[in-house]
Image: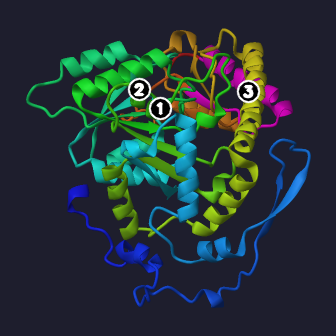
Amino acid sequence: MARTQKPSAVRALFPLENRLGMLSLLAGKPNGALFPFHALRFDVPDAMDPSTTRTLTVDPSLLAEGLQYSLVDGLPPFVEWLTSFQEREHCRERNEGWRVSSTVGSQDALHKAFSVLIDPGDCVIAEQPCFPGAISLFQMVGAEMIAAQMDHHGVITSSLRTLLENWPSEKPKPKCFYTVPFGGNPSGVTTSLDRRLEVLKLARQHNFLILEDDPYYYLYFGSTPRPPSYFSLEASSGEVGRVLRFDSFSKVLAAGMRVGFVTGPWAIINALDVYTGKTNLQASTLVHSMVLTLLREWGYEGFKSHVARVAAFYKQRRDTFEAAMRRHLSGLAEWSTPEAGMFVWFKLLLGEKQDMDTVELIGTKACAANVLALPGTVFFADSRQTPYVRASFSLLEEQYIDEALRRLRMVILAEREAPQQ
């Protein structure tokens, strides 16, 4: 699809408006003097001392820029900040053939990437279980999804290698591999360094892209050092340009701001920008002006301090949740301890009903007992029956976690004791 798209005739010329001496009669931009927003102030915690609140004011010139139509990839100083951040965070240099574009959250970036990269009938490999938002997008673009099995270390690369090496010769190999490498949704799994390196090796050998969807990257709280991202690792692998990375501030700043950004090879990001120019034109540059004001105030180290506190919060919630699971679900469920993110993926042990699907048990009976979780079937492209359940520990206050799992225990026990149909 990307090969058939051309940039917007108007927006492609926007950068020329900044040329010295240029008099522009180009775009139908509203006159900013009529915008009824003259100042924007907000209170934020001090990055190094969150008990202290600071009032920030968006610079008037930045506010004016944020209120107006802007470039497709986002407010230029914000995109520059993101580019510098990616260089520092992932040990990459911008002269290596990549760039950054902002999006309306990472789901927007996924939609556009899948749309420009994948043609109907193309094969893609995706971790199983898989984020349902990605499943629906793959189905929307007509992709054939091939499951990559996982364990508590991430994708099982030996199985992935066997799959690729025995691929039918008459069938084009997969275009890409989709992964959520930190705190996977729903698995909670963080892919080990060894597995990441093996995936990169397979990507070179079998010529596919790695779609690194990483909204939980900043929510890592494992006991060992954080594994490097695929985007970081490819720079030392001898070949760059195989990783398309999706980031989001939703989990660490505010979900409703819808601030995401995608980083990858110039040609792919350019194609995504063309798609944006024909759909929603740009992300909210007013929000960019707010976020940029905050990030400039905090600086890189301040932002890192903030996300460390966020990760510590979720670690505490994880610990509380898992302790309640041990109290109430020992012998009734099995799970692996997540080291990032906000989910626990667990298998119900239902005795003689071991192969029973969790749709009715969780979707109906647990709901009737006033506890909500998500049946595992939605995380499989074929909507298969599964004894798995996804539970989120992000929102429920700690004093209610124990009660939620006590209720779930009673539902499971009642199901185990009910006569077989």
Left-right relation of 273 to 55? left
Q: Residue 263 placed where, x, y %?
A: 45, 46
The residue that disc 2 covers is 236
| Kind of residue at disc 3 | Lys
Query: Which residue is located at x 75 percent, y 38 percent?
Result: 305
Depth check: 234 or 118 in front? Answer: 234
Give the distance between the C-alpha atoms of the residues marked 1 and 3, in whole angstroms. 25 Å
Residue at the far left in the pictured view: 170
Instruction: Answer whether residue 137 is magenta in the image.
Output: no
Magenta extent: 389-418
* Residue marked by disc 3: 315
Compared to residue 283, the image places residue 50 above or below, namely above
Instruction: Check if mark 2's residue and mark 1's residue have beta carbons within 8 Å.
Output: yes
Crowding near the residue tagged with mark 3, few <14, some 14–19, many ≥20 C-alpha atoms within 10 Å: many
Screen quadrant of the N terminus: bottom left
The amino acid at mark 2 is Ser
Mark 1: which amino acid? Answer: Ser
Residue 119 horizontal side relative to residue 12, left or right: left
Front in this rendered view, residue 290 or 352: 290
Q: CA distance from mark 2 to mark 1?
A: 8 Å
Residue depth check, mark 2 versus mark 3: number of the one nearer the observer: 2
